Structure formats: C-alpha cells, structure tokens
Amino acid sequence: MSQSVRITSKTDAQQPFFLGVDVGGTGIKIGLVDDNGNTLAFETLPTLEPDGPTAAMRRVANILARFIEHLSIEPDEIAAIGLGAPGPMDLAAGLLVQPPQLPSWWDFNLRDCLAELTQRPVALNNDANAAAYGEFWLGSGKSATSMVLLTLGTGVGGGIISEGQLINGANSFGGEFGHLMVDPSPNARLCAWGGGRGQFEAYASASAVAIRTRQRLTEGAASSLNKSDGEVTPLDVFHAAEQNDLLALEIIDETAQWLGIGITTIVHVLDPGMVVIGGAMTFGGSQSPVGRRFLASVREQFRQRTFDNVFAGTSIDFAQLGADAGYLGAAGYARSRMHSKTMGL
C-alpha cells in the first residue's frame, strides 16, 4: 500500500466505482476510485516488461478481483476501467504501437486484453494525457475549464484539456509537447533518444539538464558537482542549487528560460488559461526556495514573450497530485467517457 495515497472507506464513497491503471516501464499503479475521485483501494505491481502485456494485464485483473472481494462489492459496481500507458499508440484501435519503455509490448491491443480479462469496459489513454486529466479533475486544474499539463521527466510529456475535453488528436499524438520545435538552428541540441534536433525535450527535460551540466563540468566550470563520479542527475543539480552552487543555479535558470519559450508557444496556440508543471523534475516544487525560484523564472520568461492581457489571464503553477495523477486521471477519463455514454466492451 502506498503511504502517499489517502484511502476512503466504502461507507463514505459515492458510487459508481472506477479502476484506474497507470502502466510504466518498471511499475504499475492500480487504484479503485469512486465517483468523486476518492481512492478506496490502491496497489502497485512491478511491470515485469519481458513477461509481456498479457501477463501484466492478468495480474491487474487479479488485483481488481482482490479489491472486489476485500470491499464486498459486486463486479458490476465497477462501471469502467481507465488504462494509461506510454505512447505512441492507436487509441481508436486500443493498440500500443511502439512504446520505447515496453519493447515486448509493441503492436498489442492492451485495451481489449484487459476488457476481456475483467469483463468491464476499458478506456485507454496515453499516460501523460491521463495525468493531465487527473490534475484537471482533482488537482491544480480542478477549478479550470481548460488547462495544459507539462510533465518534466526523462522527456517532456503533457496533455491538453480544452473546455473540459481531453484532446487526444487524430493520430493519438495530442499533447506530445516534447516534440515542439524551440530551436531551428542547424547546431541545435538533439534529444537524448538520438533524434529530434531543436525540440523542447532537448532543452527542458531531466535528460537535457544532466547533459548540459556534464558538458559545463567537462568545459571546466567550477562547481561542487565536480565531486561527483560523473553521473550527474537533476536531483544532484537541485541539491547543489539548495547550497547556492552557481553552476546549478545557472542550469536551472536556463531550463526555466527554455520552459518559458515552450509555454509561450503552447499558450499562443491553445490559450488554455492555466499551465501546470509536473513530473519528477520540478526542483522541489512549491516546497523549496529553488523550486519557487524556478517557477518565478518560468513566469517571467513567459511575461517577456506574450501580451499583457494573456499573461494576466494565464496561471502557471506546479501540479498537486504527484505520482498519483496517472491512475486518478485514468479513472477520471473512464468516468467521463461513461457519463458521456461513449464506452462499451
């Protein structure tokens, strides 16, 4: 049981219930959620990627059966299942296409597999889009009608909510902000995965922070980070910045600049009114002076590049749900599909 997840008793829950499943490269989060977004039960499983998708979905189905037995509820009280997984994918067909984190799962119909194992309708979505819906439903965006989530991790992901609707896109590629062009120069940086010259991910991701820091150290920059074994991580940069290390602060300020550039482009296209920053790399978030400095720098970069009325009408803040956003958003997306009567086995 995750210590971070607050569990609501069945007697305080509001039917119907929804299962949220967040599939990652190493772990799977599974939560049973009520109609108000309260969690009744939660479990994590190792993904065991080489065992394949069917084995993983069978273990998810077993967890659902355990939840049903433990809470003494009927299977048909589970109205729907929301399933978030890494892309790329074909949402209309229910397929994972070629997720790099799950090489043994390529070209597999994950949606129909879980639906067959559980006999419940399943709504499949990209994991970052699911997280965006979670923040919209229960987190930083719960008072908004539209919002954008940016997730800063190994890459840059995200999701778009427009007038209450999650934008998946014609090719199931909506919200893939990491591939936004921010630098058209011929010597622009490459994404860590070996392609995507000049794309957002090459400048504002955790991978980019680590690469830029190592480059500066190789060039002879003075920093406490020189004491490391060469494997510098964004967490190392954050801790050094907490001690006022000048290189670490410079790297974080640069990241804020690129993030502000990307956010400006996104806002000028979508005008969502709210941009939420989440993922593993928020430099301590609102709980840290470094994180607050980072967010203030992002806002200032945006202010310098947009119109006064757009800046005044756009909130930029940190996400609230952390690692729980994925399973909560998957459940919430299934809930929205059920309430709009667009689901079926």
Image: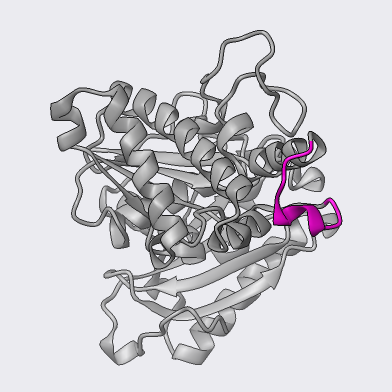
Does 171 appear above or below 343?
above
- The colour scheme used to paint the residues is one colour
Residue at the location (57% across, 66% down)? 118
Which contiguous range is marked in magenta?
A: 220-230
Which quarter of the picture shows residue 162?
Answer: top left
As drawn, 27 above or below 12: above
Give how far across and how far down residue 201 sits, in percent: 59, 33
Q: Nearer the viewer, residue 228 or 88?
A: 228
Q: Quadrant of residue 270?
A: top left
Q: Is residue 177 above or below residue 221?
A: above
Q: Can residue 72 be seen?
A: yes
Q: Is residue 153 visible?
A: no
Q: Looking at the picture, how far across and down is residue 203, in whole percent?
A: 59, 32
**Left or right side of 46 for 34:** left
Residue closest to the eye, 201 or 166:
201
Q: Residue furthest top?
A: 186
Q: Position of residue 264 (x, y in %)?
A: 35, 27
**Does 130 sit left or right of 196 as displayed?**
left
Residue at point 51%, 20% (across, down): 182
Query: Residue 225: within the magenta?
Result: yes
| Residue at the (72%, 35%) spot, across then down | 98
Q: Residue at x 47, y 41 (%)?
A: 158
Q: Is residue 248 left or right of residue 297?
A: right
